[in-house]
Image: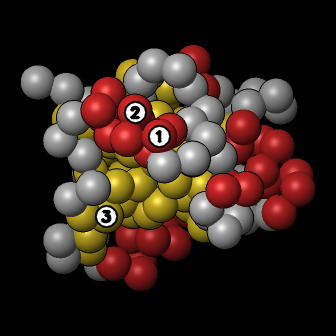
Amino acid sequence: MRKIEHIGIAVKNLEVSNLLFEKLFGTPSYKQEEVASEGVKTSFFMNGPNKIELLEATNPESPIAKFLEKKGEGIHHIAFDVEDIISEMARLKKEGFVVLNETPKKGADNKLVAFLHPKGTNGVLIELCQEIH
């Protein structure tokens, strides 16, 4: 893992939260995108070198909807940039981590993504991200 790629924050209403984070950072969202396969709409903000992703559920069965129902709004995951997601997934499995998907899937912001089960990472959902070339 090379660096924190972004921090994901689950929100109930993306439009309202966008306004809040625009005020907080003094800059608008630079990208909004829907990832239908995950049942989520996303909005990205830059704050210096740091990226924040806001996530709103688009259906009640999505992972974000379930998270919001259980825990409410707040930090959902921390994403790490990796050079080779396949080899990083294999390395982490060998180390005993539970990878939630067998193969990387297409995520938001032109990334291949995979997730580690939070039960093995002190309750923190970890996302691995590799830029799609």
Of residues 57 and 122, which is closer to you in this image?
122
Q: Is residue 96 above or below residue 47?
A: above
Of residues 130 and 67, which is closer to you in this image?
130
Q: Is residue 112 above or below residue 9?
A: above
Can residue 128 be seen here? yes
Q: Is residue 5 above or below residue 130?
A: below
Tell me the residue that label 2 is attached to: 90
| Foreground disc of the pair 1, 2 | 1
Any mark on residue 4, and which?
3
- Tell me which amino acid carries mark 2: Ala
Left or right of 38, for residue 113: left
Tell me the residue that label 1 is attached to: 94
Snapshot quadrant of residue 68:
bottom right
Dots 1, 2 in contact, CB < 8 A:
yes
Any mark on residue 124, and which?
none
Dots 1, 3 in contact, CB < 8 A:
no
Q: Position of residue 90 (x, y in %)?
A: 40, 33
Q: Earlier in the sequence, mark 3 or mark 2?
A: 3
- Tell me which amino acid carries mark 3: Ile
Left or right of 71, for residue 132: left
